[in-house]
Image (tube, rainbow, N blue to C red):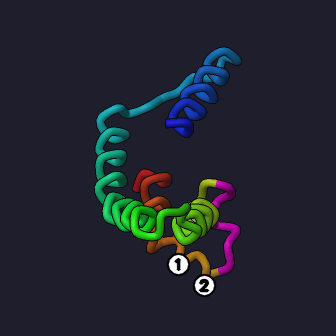
Amino acid sequence: MINSISAVTVLLIGLGLGISYKVNALATITFLILYLASIIGLNLIAGAVVLIVKQGNPIALFTSVASNLLGGVVFPISVLPTWLRYISYSLSLTWALSGA
């Protein structure tokens, strides 16, 4: 929820600064649904681990940070070494962000 609020805030600030967004709504919704379907299993496993051990899940935090770094959220995957780029291509986040 917090990430959604942040994303909307950034988009609204961009609109306030005069940035025009050209978005294909159908493609955006399609990629969002496909991305959510691809990560739901991992999220269910992470939630189950939290319920079992009754504390925060450092493994889920690590995988989240790693996927953000390797998926192209922080910087483009083109700057990664070749062997890390291949790992990046195996993440659904990479494909969701590229829209391909």
Q: Nearer the viewer, residue 27 or 70?
A: 70
Q: Classify mark 1: helix, strand or loop.
A: helix
Left or right of 65: which side holds 39? left
**Image coords of residue 22 (percent x, y):** 48, 29
Image position of 90 with respect to 57: above or below: below
Q: Residues within 10 Å of mark 1 (few under 14, many from 20)?
A: few
Image position of 28 with respect to 39: above or below: above
Q: Nearer the viewer, residue 79 or 93?
A: 93
Evaluate if marks 1 and 2 touch, with contact meaning CB atoms under 8 Å apart.
yes
Q: Residue at x 29, y 55 (%)?
A: 37
**Image coords of residue 36 (percent x, y):** 34, 52
The chief SS type of the magenta part is loop
**Image coords of residue 60 (percent x, y):** 52, 66
Which residue appears farthest toward the front when viewing the image? 54
Q: Is residue 62 visible?
A: yes
Q: Nearer the viewer, residue 7 or 19?
A: 7
Amino acid at the residue labelled 1: Ile
Residue indicated by mark 2? 83
Q: Classify mark 2: helix, strand or loop.
A: helix
Q: The magenta stretch spans which residues?
A: 74-81
Residue indicated by mark 1? 87
Quadrant in the rendering for residue 14: top right
- The disc at residue 58 is none
